[in-house]
Amino acid sequence: MASPNDIRKGTVIKLNGELWSVVSFQRVSPGKGSSFVRTRIKSLASGKVVENNFKSAENLTFEEVGFKKMQYIFRDDNTITFMDGQNFEQVALGKDIVGEEARFLKEGLEVTIVMHGEQALAMELPLKITYKITQTDPAIKGDTASGNVLKDATAENGLLLRVPIFIKEGDEVMISTESGDYVERVSR
Amino acid sequence: MLSKEELEYRIALWNRVQNRLRIFFVERGYLEVQTPVVVRSPGMEPNLDPVAIELKDVVGVGMRAGLITSPEYAMKKLLGAGLERIFTITPVFRNYEENGGTHATEFTMLEWYRQKVDYLACIEETKLLIDTVLKDTVAGEMEGVVEGVVDRVVDGAVDGEEDGGKIGDCWFTISYVAEFKNRFGGQPDAMSLSELAVLAEGAGIVFGGDTRADELVDLLFNAVLLPDLVNQHPKLVIKEYPVSGAALAKRSVDGLFAERFEIYVKGLEICNGFTELTDSTEQRRRFEEEGELRRELGKAVYPIDEELLGGLDSISDPTYGNALGVDRLVMLVAGTKEIDAIAVFPPSQRYKFSKL
């Protein structure tokens, strides 16, 4: 038996006799009150996607799946392709499955691909990814008219970011893939 | 370790926020106090897990103790002894939390209490506090805390007038019980377990057979109603909680809700305040109930804090109290939803957990 807190992307849950793979999830733990895991899950049989909330203190049954480290290599109109660095085997995931998270991909990035038998179910990003800043303006007076201490920046893969104003072009920054927010500058 | 530049930036943010908080309370006649972190009775709430520790005296005799999940009990003892307006900024600890994102095992709590006024006054004071901190720390009233880095931050920031809507968003207040009734057709405390179970199943909530009615109410509100509410209202006050979620809050005169509120800013839960329960008999009953529930859930049960109960009846009715997450406030000022981006010692790198 597993707990909802063990849910990660691609986890396959057996629910009412059907298999569902987790498309996205978020743990919610209020200061007071029961914690739960908010999920979008996809039926492996019909492809239907539904939203579910799992109360944290419950038991769930997970179906066995494999987690494979693979590198992002390229994308075309409909799919994104990854390669196993050991045996050069390739798998493709639909862009609709990867969703918004495709924006975090950069060439050679190692991700986890969730496999159910021969079928690739989902891509799991590292929690944090380091990017080189290729464009950002120096901080000047009146710059951050939006009222906070961040400014716009562009990363090597075109990802648009908000970073603290001491960040310069050429700096490497660590970004959270959960929120898309800046976490820290990588010390050189 | 983070780089010196990054550290200075973060330390400056914390200094500015904490200095502004202190000025706010001192100007309003509050005394700053410090409360113990290691205690015999760290808290009874069924949803919280204190970090348990073993203390030894000078000859090695041990006792079970815990780290506080909030300074509430100590603060109330001071109120019972006659102090009328007090605040504290203290580390607090909670087990079974994530470290990273918006959570951490150890975080910083601002807690304050004022006698003779109720939670409605507290809501107004808290709105003013949050607006003041956001406006002044972002707009740079406290310039020059750290040379260089912060001066640039301050220069780049705006003056209060042109905040581009970031700070100037309007406050919006809703009633928990009214909102719940609108959506689900009944007063949360009046609905039966089976009615709630049908609603929860319909809303895609997966729960076990031993789930209690108050948990289902909570899940329905937090999973179904709250996401839309915080999306629509960047500065949201939720008041009038169900009596089942009263914790240490007083019931309203008509008995229909607990005088409790929470504030969410940009989707982040910032604080939780009450008109405090000052009836020691009722408080003892709730502690015993919660202790029983903790036993059933297989959680540690700590002794009831008799010193707290002994002073409770001397506290004025009404008295309000509020607990606010300072890390979250710093996150708002820094424009981030990552505690790792504002902490001087990032929580996600502090511990190494391994399966036993």
Image (cartoon, coloured by chain):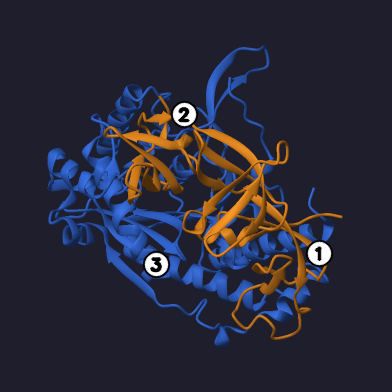
Chain colours: A orange, B blue
Report the residue at 52% width, 34% height from top: B95
- The amino acid beneath tag 2 is Glu
Residues flagged by tags 2 and 1 on a common chain: yes
Q: CA distance from mark 3 to mark 1?
A: 33 Å
Q: Disc number at residue B231?
A: 3
In front of the other: label 3 or label 1? 1
Report the residue marked by disc 2: A64
Q: Quadrant of residue B181?
A: bottom left
Dividing the picture into quarters, in which one does residue A21 lie? top left
Q: Residues within 10 Å of mark 2 (few under 14, many from 20)?
A: few
Residue A92 in the image: state x and y as whole percent.
56, 50
Seen at 20% across and 61% down, the residue is B178
Residue B286 or residue A171, whichever sits in front: A171
Q: CA distance from mark 2 to mark 1?
A: 41 Å
Give residue B89's mark: none
Q: Amino acid at mark 3?
A: Asn
Rendered residue at 28%/66% (across/down): B174
Q: Is residue B317 visible?
A: no
Mark 3 near mark 1, Cβ–Cβ under 8 Å?
A: no
The chain to which mark 3 is attached is B
Q: Which residue is mark 1?
A: A171
Residue A70 placement: quadrant:
top right
Question: Tag 2, which chain?
Answer: A
Give the structural element (helix, strand or loop) at label 1: loop
Q: Could one spot residue A148 in this view of the protein? A: yes
At x 70% / y 41%, what residue is drawn? A88
Q: Chain of mark 1?
A: A
On the rendered structure, is A21 left or right of A84?
Answer: left
Residue B273 image point, x, y percent: 39, 55
